Amino acid sequence: MDFKNIPSVDLADFTEGNKETKAAFVKELGKAYEEIGFVAVKNHGLSDALCAELYAEVKGFFTLSKEEKEAYEIEGLAGQRGYVSFGKEHAKNKNEGDLKEFWHFGQTVEDNDPIKEEYPDNVQVNELPKFNAVGRKSIKS
């Protein structure tokens, strides 16, 4: 494994491609997650300004104290929304926890679609007034 070269995929291959291009995208994405655990995505549709704004808000969240962050870790959601602290997740076939923490924004169902029952609400961060609004913009893009 060469960790110096982060795998990169082009989302346009999936969103605008034909059947073969879409299949190749899925294969590349899966390979990147299996071999490295992360991937860079081009043509994701987020403007540079929105990326900068999102980065600033997320950075603000992760500078909160451990206790403040853990207040947003919602039991029973298996990391589907909100904060997940260090060691809670682990790699496939591993017993030790991952050395990462993360925040998960998810889809918001805004109409009366019955699928709403399948999507937990996003967790609202009180300490950062723009955090959720910026996160929501990034998901809609």
Image (spheres, rainbow, N blue to C red):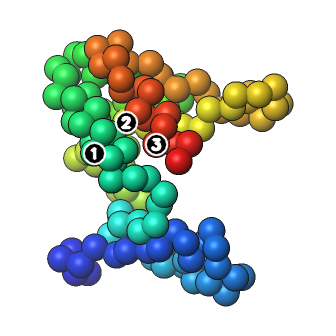
Residue 84 in the image: above or below residue 67: below
* Residue 43 point in image, percent of width and height: 46, 66
> Which of disc 3 and disc 2 is earlier in sequence?
2
Q: Residues within 10 Å of mark 1 (few under 14, many from 20)?
A: few
Quick one: SS at disc 2? Answer: strand
Q: Extreme bottom residue here?
A: 20
* Residue 131 point in image, percent of width and height: 36, 26
Task: Please name the residue shown 33% across and 53% down the image.
Answer: 48
Q: Which residue is mark 3?
A: 138
Q: Is residue 74 visible?
A: no
Q: Which residue is mark 1?
A: 52
- Residue nearest the viewer, comparing 77 with 126: 126
Q: CA distance from mark 1 to mark 3?
A: 11 Å
- Kindly identify which numbered label has been placed on residue 103: 2
Residue 68 in the image: above or below residue 99: above
Q: Are marks 1 and 3 in contact (CB under 8 Å)?
A: no
Q: Is residue 33 left or right of residue 71?
A: right
- Residue nearest the viewer, comparing 141 with 33: 141
Q: Are marks 2 and 3 in contact (CB under 8 Å)?
A: no
